[in-house]
Amino acid sequence: MAIETTYRDALRTAIIEEMERDEDVFVVGEDIGRYEGTFKVTKGLFPKFGSGRVVDTPICEPGFTGIAIGAAMTGLRPIVEMMTMSFSILAIDQIINHAAKIHYMTGGQAKVPLVIRGPGGAAHQLSAQHSHSLEGWYAHVPGLKVVAPATVEDVYGMFKQAVRDDNPVIFTENPGLYGIKGAIPEDKDFTVPFGQARVAREGKDITLVSYSRMVHVCLGAAEALEKEGVSAEVVDVRSLLPLDTATIYGSVRKTHRAMVVYEDWRSGGFGAEIAARIGEDCFDDLDAPVGRVGGLNVPMPYSRILELECTPNEDDVLAAVRKLG
Amino acid sequence: MAELKSKLPYTTAQLEDLFRQLVFIRHFEEKTNFAYRQGKVGGYMHVYIGMEATAIGWNAALRHGYDYVITAYRDHPQPLLMGTDPVHVMAEIMGRSGGTSKGKGGSMHIYDIEKGFFGGWGIVGGHTALGAGLAFAAKYRDEDRVTLCYLGDGAANAGVFFESLNMAALWDLPVIFIIENNKFAMGTRLEYHAADTEMHKRGFPFGMRHERLDGMDLFQVCDDAKRIVETVRKEGKPYLVEAMNYRFAGHGAADNDRQLYRTKEEEDEAMKRDPIALFQAKVLAEGALTKERMAEIDAEQAARVEEIYARADQSPHPDPSEVYEDLYTDMEPEKGH
């Protein structure tokens, strides 16, 4: 029997179940305990587990991320909440210079079973310093794993996988997804392995490749395209590092057209990496150049009208597909 | 307990052991300098010559195999004192596959996690948060492990260090931050890099106990370290120590012109407090060890270091195929250029 729930509640359920399963798992971050979390993901955890395992920190991302890394090196399994992924920029020295390097730099002696999670991408008029999509930055870094689940089932199963993983995992949640509905299985050991993309919708004329909230934009665009007689397949990448190119290529080899859709700045974002790979490895299968739809290359503005202008929507995808021919 | 031969509260065997550690670290570091000049060591390398008493005295106060130690990039002595195979340390410095990190760390990144040595870090100040994290883990598990977190006077200006001090004090983490004040942040003198040159006062705003202590006289360091480690173990609260020492060598092996930031006269003055000379003067004055015995130990250790170097030099360089190993615990990275 599946349990109907939301993305936010499924994530919270996964956190609670992993904390109940393993005493080494704890959560740490700003305003996550007594205040219940800015996006309420950690609501109810503090009374349940206490201040020892739900650790409210001072406002100091480098410091508390470093503490989590040090603790992880001794075998604990910290879950770090970034109030928004934009704030993880402060901790990027700890994440990239430290966490990502440790297993390698110690010659395999030390493991870092660490999850860094939080909302990444535009929410609603949070403007330029709270709206970054940084998954491409992190997916650039060897030693990290980076995932961006789009559905309720995936956020539940991939979070459990992240906590059980012995490597540092960047777990990014688009704030626009917290309220979406879906179902999770009853099995408390349900996990979704990393490095496996998901075909979210089958089609035969074009492949729309995306992850996180943009999967839903692509699904909407695919419905509209269907009315125009174009059958679009939607591939939900889910895991950026490791990346399942086999599923992406399999789809492109079937449809012969590819459009990569991502919310991050268009220039240099992770979608560019996916597009480059399709171009390199599927050149002979393509009937058109690989297309891309990304966020506008400007800081996120405050005005709702301008914010919506920056973030790719169904119309942007449709226009790009039509242009591709 | 064996009978004490002098007024010093150490047996002859203990005194010999302390002296052995002093000259061993000195010879080991001099050998790494030699290896660097021979082209057997590359990159950045920072030796501990002149500062030996600090690491030896604090190490002596630890429960080995239980307590945690973490430091920055001047990291050769700690693993050697904690029982890591010195051939593995030397091989790592030389980038060989028999090194502690199989040649992937180098001089700045020595680790022996099993023995409680957590590195070995190159981002100045960055590891202080990890040190607080080691202590956090001990507290989380309700263990009475103590963590020693060494840093330099330069690192004591880093923002993340202040963040770590705050959390260590806020959460009562059993960590001892040891600021090794050797008076230079690389080539920048203390007076030019710190608004308040009394580094121990950095503990004050956080209500953390703090002391400025000598880092050159091994007997003094041993006494202070024992007292403070016992206090932290018992009370489970952090402590900040400013250990006053001096590096006789340059910042790193590539620092060839020390006159840019200090005078020969200043160095000569500092070297009057060479920790080896201080130790020798004390034990001779007390009649606790003879000159001849110490010369014997010195020669033994010099020979031992030669042997370590020769064995490390026999360790092969890594095979190019090893480049992909140990990036992830459970998968291989993508391959190829």
Image (cartoon, coloured by chain):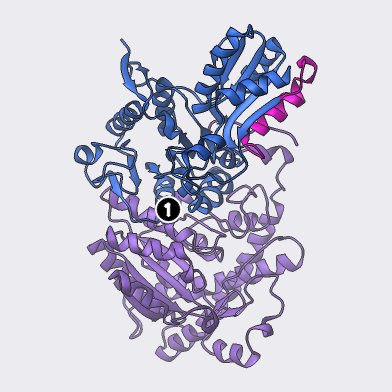
SS type, badge 1: helix
Q: Position of residue B37 (x, y in %)?
A: 75, 68
The quarter of the picture where the N terminus of chain B appears is bottom left
Between A89 and B91, the one lying in front of the other is A89
Q: Which chain is blue?
A: A
- In the depicted structure, whether residue A216 falls above or below residue B334: above
- In the depicted structure, whether residue B263 falls above or below residue A270: below
The kind of residue on which mark 1 rests is Glu
Between A271 and B255, the one lying in front of the other is A271
The quarter of the picture where the C terminus of chain B appears is top right
Q: Chain of mark 1?
A: A
B67 relative to A205 in the view: left or right:
left
Between B191 and B296, the one lying in front of the other is B191
A166 relative to A322 in the view: left or right:
left
Which region of the structure is painted magenta? A266-290
B98 relative to B83 in the view: left or right:
right
Q: Position of residue B241 (x, y in %)?
A: 38, 74
- Say if the magenta span includes residue A288: yes
Task: Decide if residue B11 is in sight here.
Answer: no
- In the depicted structure, whether residue A198 falls above or below residue B75: above
Task: Decide if residue B237 is in sight here.
Answer: yes
Residue A141 sits in quarter: top right
Q: Which chain is purple?
A: B
